[in-house]
Amino acid sequence: MGVLAVFVWTVCCITCSVHAEIFTSIGQMTDLLFTERELVQSLKEYIQAEESKLAAVKRWADKLEVLTRASTSDPEGFLAHPVNAYKLVKRLNTEWSELESLVLHDPSDGFISNISVHRQVFPDQEDENGAAKALMRLQDTYNLDSESFSKGKLPGQGQYSGVRYNAFLTVDDCFDMGKTAYNENDYYHAVLWMQQALRQKDAGEEAKVPKAEILDYLSYSVYQMGDLPRAIELTRRLVSIDPSHQRAGGNLRYFERLLSKELREMDQNRPEPTEEKPIQLGTYERPRDYLPEREAYEALCRGEGIRMTPQRSSRLFCRYQDRNRNPRLLLKPMKEEDEWDSPHIVRYLEALSDEEMNRIKELAKPKLARATVRDPKTGVLTTAQYRVSKSAWLEDEDDLVIRRVNQRIEDVTGLTVDTAELLQVANYGVGGQYEPHFDFSRKDEPDAFKSLGTGNRVATYLNYMSDVDAGGATVFPDFGAAIWPRKGTAVFWYNLFRSGEGDYRTRHAACPVLIGSKWVSNKWIHERGQEFRRPCGLTEVD
């Protein structure tokens, strides 16, 4: 716009000169020739600026045209890769705004009005941060280093997987990941991602973020992790790149004083500087959090620590289930497989047809909202960070398919669904998970289901409505079981003993989805109405 201002100002000057009767003097008019030449030069600079801007916009449009052509041809397949999901959120939250600013230099009403309308449904900064944290969650759960993520090399991307798209993280992407962690005081992940950004920058990759800024964040995050020698080496490198850096000199002197003090207290001499070694996934220990069974839970998600012994496996069988000659199961009994012996968990094969699953998804999509959990103290549904998915509730009146599925659940389990909760449909997006939890209410939360008036959740029936290329298992940390999603199947277990006491072994989790889109639907069956269908036992743990 500055060039345009010069252009307009020069035109004004000519107009004023003409109005001052310049034409009466050839000498003065010759000056106008030079003015016109300058005007043409200004005009060319303006055109060049506009062409540069349009070229930048065209490059962006061409790149996005190729990307959107591929992504919209198979949306779920494209978003099955978590990096694609993260970069989509990042593009819409950050990069489209940068493009908007570029176009605003010469306002285009059509584009601005269009983007303003669509901005209402754009992800915001909170969404971008959430997507970044999801990648870090996957990194932790599946022991993936930042370089694997950056290069798009993830487990489950085999030749026969459903993932046909790869994705890469640039220096700026890695820096933004690290900055997200840094702003949350999560220095462990800040170190891993800033180190990856630095590694790619050192390899010659072009980026908007300067190397000094990466070193600034990285050195301080390393200091927060308690590694003073490495923090000093990184800060020295920062000072060598930018001697006038506002904080680097002060930080360096402070780190050196701290290290000298520590060495004096340990009665040791300062070690000789060693060659800087890159920070790897296991360089620093991940801080512990609120979840006591975190290690066991994540190991099971990776398929490690499963306690299925040959002796236990020998007690597992498969059978045709007609539930005491139920008329609807006589001609076509349900195929039932034992998944675990104690507590008893079964899987039903061909529990849903493709047509039924597609219809359920179709009904649920318009209703999907952030999944909630029931507050144990108040019984009110609320969102929680440990449950990352979107869900919808479907009832019999919504469609004949829902009525048919609910009837099938009643037939195959032998339990009434008249007092059950509505069919819940859930879709797990990037890094979607549900950390270890109980489905039933414990003694310290007696009001959890009071408003329903149907007693506690006696059993859980879970339909898998998609295959998942990697991750997404249902795991039980207490007894070391992992059940993997298989499209069209369902698993069933009791949450309560026959006495009505809770079976605490059934604490379970939905592992983060690494690659794929996980769709499930579940039915929580309650106690009321089961008195004669599942009579009380003689002991507390029958």
Image: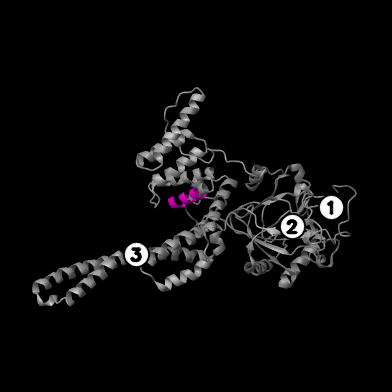
Identify the residue at the far top of this view: 267
Q: Main secondary structure of the magenta part?
A: helix
x, y percent for residue 453: 81, 61
Front residue (pair 270, 479): 270
In the picture of the structure, the residue carrying the numbered disc 3 is: 53
Point out the tag, 2 or 1, that comes first from the N-terminus.
2
The residue under label 1 is 500
Residue 458, image x and y in percent? 80, 56
**Which image quarter holds the N terminus?**
bottom left
| Residue type at the position of mark 3 | Lys
Which amino acid, by three-letter code, is at mark 1? Gly
What SS does tag 2 mark?
loop
Residue that carries the numbered disc 2 in the rendered image? 379
Q: Are marks 3 and 1 in contact (CB under 8 Å)?
A: no
Q: Residue at x 44, y 26 (%)?
A: 270
Q: How many marks?
A: 3
Label whose residue precedes the other's in the sequence (3 or 1): 3
Q: Residues within 10 Å of mark 1 (few under 14, many from 20)?
A: some
Query: For the residue labelled by badge 1, is the local secondary structure a helix, a strand or a loop?
Result: loop
Mark 3 lies on a secondary structure that is: helix
Q: Is residue 539 above or below residue 236?
A: below
Above or below: residue 509 compared with residue 78:
above
- The quarter of the picture where residue 79 lies is bottom right
Q: What's the magenta region?
A: 171-180
